[in-house]
Image (cartoon, rainbow, N blue to C red):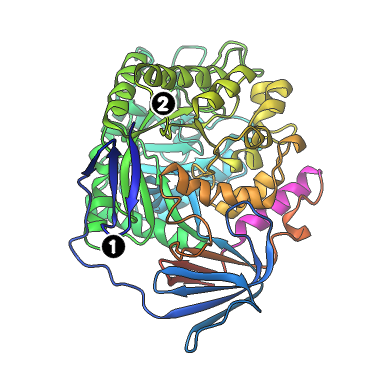
Amino acid sequence: MWKHQYNQSLNQYLVVEPSKVVSIKNTHATKKRRQPIGTKAILCGCLIDGTGRPALNDVTIIVKGNKITAVGKRNEVKVPEGAETIDATGKTVLPGLIDSHTHFLGMGYSLTHLQLIDARSIGEIKEGLRDYISTRKIGKGKWVQGRQWDDQNLKEGRYPTRHDLDEVSPDNPVALTRICGHMITLNTRALEACGITRTTPNPPGGVIDRDKRGEPTGVLRDARGLVTPHIPPPTHEELRQGIRDAVALAHSLGCTGVTDCSRPDESAPHLSTKPYIDAHRENDLHLRCHVMTWYPREWSGDQWLTLGTLKIGIDGSAGAQTALMFEPYSNNPATCGVYVGDQERNKRVVAEQHAKGGEVAIHAIGDRACYEALDRIEEALEAKPRPDHRYRIEHFEYPIDADIERARKLGVIASMQPNFVGEWAWPGGMYDIRVGPERLARGNPYRRLLDLGFHMPFGSDGMPFHPLYGLWSAVNHPQPGSRITLEEAVRCFTLEGAYVTREEAIKGSLERGKLADIAIFDGDLRGNWFKLGGTEPRAIEQQKAGIKRRRAWMTILDGEVVHKA
C-alpha cells in the first residue's frame, strides 16, 4: 500500500511503502526563499476555521513566522509583547482559499487577450473586437484571441459565428473561446489559416459546426486541436508573466493555493509545467500550486509546488453540448454529447499512473461520462487495490444514483465547481435549457454528497475565477435541497482543497501548527447580504454582480501580508 506523507524537516513529500521510505525528486528552489519573521496577532470578528465547525466570534490568532501558534477566544489568548496587531473586528477571517480546479497558467497568460465575460450581445462582442484591434494597433494578418463569451448572456441567444466576426475583422485571423473552454469561434481568415473547409472531417472527439450547405460556421466544439498549432505559442517569459499576473489576482481574492488543470492544447505539454518549475526555482512563485499533467508521473514537490496528478478527459461541457449524457439534450435531441478522449489511451495511462503511485483526475460532467470515469478508476483499483488513493472526478455534475453509490464505495473525490450552479443552474438558465428539469434537479448534488461522506474540494474552472462567488453559489444553490452551510462551503474551499493534494496536515484550516495562509473579508459572511435575496432573475443577477465585485480585505500567505485593500 502506498501512502504520501509530508516531511516537515525535509520540506518535501515522501512516498511511503511498507518498511521503505523513498525520497522523490522534487523541484527545490535554487535561491533561498526569505523566511517570514516577527509575530502577528489577528483580532477576528467572525472566524470560520475551515474544519466545518461552527463559526466563532471574537477570536485571536497568533502567527509567528509562517506558522499559526495559537487560536482561541480573545480573553483566553495572550497577545505577545511587540506583536503586530491586525484588527479584523467586524470582518470574516478564513483560511486562505484554495481553488482546486483552475486553468491558472492559461488564465494568467490570456489576461492580455480580449475579455468578453461582460458581453451581453453579439453586437458587444463585435464592438469589443473592433476596439481591441484598433487600440492595440494589431497589424493585418496577426492573430487575435479572445475569451469567456457566454451565449447564455447574449440577447441573440446563439453562438457567434464567422460571419459575425468577419464584419469587424476581415484582415486578421480571430479565435474567441467560450467561457467553458470547450468551444471556440473562428472567423473566415482563421478557418483559412487552419485549413478548415467543408471537406475537413470532424476530429476525434470534436465537432465542426456546419450550415445547411455544409460550410463551417466557424464554431468548433472540443476541436481546438485543429487551431492551436496555427497560433504562435506564447514565449516562456510571457507564461512566466502570466503566472505573476494570475497570482496577483488570486491574492486580491483571498486565494492562497490552486490546482492548475491546464490542457496541452492551451499551450503545450511542456509549457504547462516548466514555467512553474522555473518560477519556483527562482523564488518567483508566490502561491501554493499543484499542477496536473496529461502524462503519468510520480508525486513530487514541496509546500509551494507539487506535481503528480494525471488528468484525462471523458467529455466536454454542457454549454458546448459536448458533455456526454445517457439521453439526448433537451434542446437538441440529435446529440447526447461527445466522448472527447481516447478510451484505450485513457485505460493505459490510468493504469500507468496507478502503478507509479501518483493520483488521477478525470474530467466528467455528463451522467454517461461519470459512468465511464468510474469504470477507469474501478479497473485500476481492482487490478491493484490502493486504499489511500485520492482519485478524483472533475465536475461530477450529473451522476446517476447508482454511480454516486459506486463512487462512494470506491472512495472517489468529487471535485466540484459551485460557480457553475451560480452561473447556469437557475430555472430557465442554460442548464435547464440544455438538460431539462429532471437532470437539472439532480445535478451538482452537494448536500447529498457531503451527507454520504464524500470529500468535495471546490474550484472555479475559471468561470469566473472567484472563490468568494463560489462560496455564495454553494450556500445559495438554485436547488434548495442541494444547499450546504457556509461552514461546509468554506471547508470545501480550504481543508478539502488541501486534502486532495495530500497537504491537510500542513494547511487548509486555521489551527495551531499549520501554515499561516489566511483570507480576511470585510463584513460578516453570515449576514443577509451573503444570502439569496429573492428569486426574481434581475435581483439574482444584481446580487451575483455585487459578490463578484468584492475583493479580500487582506490576504496573508506564509505569514506575510501579500494583499491589503
Whole-number angstrom distance, CA of label 2 to CA of label 1 = 31 Å
- Mark 2: amino acid: Gly
Quadrant assignment, res 8: bottom left
Quarter of the picture holding the C terminus: bottom right
Which residue is tagged 1? Answer: 284
Q: Secondary structure at mark 1?
A: loop
Q: Residue at x 46, y 49 (%)?
A: 498
Specify whether residue 339 is in view.
yes
Q: Which residues are magenta?
A: 535-551
- Give the percent coordinates (x, y) of residue 452: 63, 32
Q: Residue at x 72, y 53 (%)?
A: 543
Q: Nearer the viewer, residue 505 or 85?
A: 505
- Mark 1: amino acid: Asp
Quarter of the picture holding the N terminus: top left
Say if mark 2 contacts mark 1, CB within 8 Å: no
Q: Nearer the viewer, residue 123 or 559?
A: 559
Q: Nearer the viewer, residue 307 or 101?
A: 307
Instruction: Report the residue that reaches farthest toward the left.
Output: 30
Q: Secondary structure at mark 2?
A: strand
Which residue is tagged 2? Answer: 313
Q: Is residue 502 magenta?
A: no
Dot 1, crowdedness within 10 Å: few (<14), some or many (≥20)? some
**Left or right, 243 with reference to 57:** left
First reached walking from the N terminus: tag 2 or tag 1: 1
- Give the percent coordinates (x, y) of residue 221: 46, 25
Q: Nearer the viewer, residue 506 or 45?
A: 506
Quadrant assignment, res 397: top right
Q: Residue at x 40, y 48 (%)?
A: 104
Dot 2, crowdedness within 10 Å: few (<14), some or many (≥20)? many
Magenta span: helix, strand or loop, mainly?
helix
**Left or right, 333 with reference to 235:** right
Q: Is residue 544 magenta?
A: yes
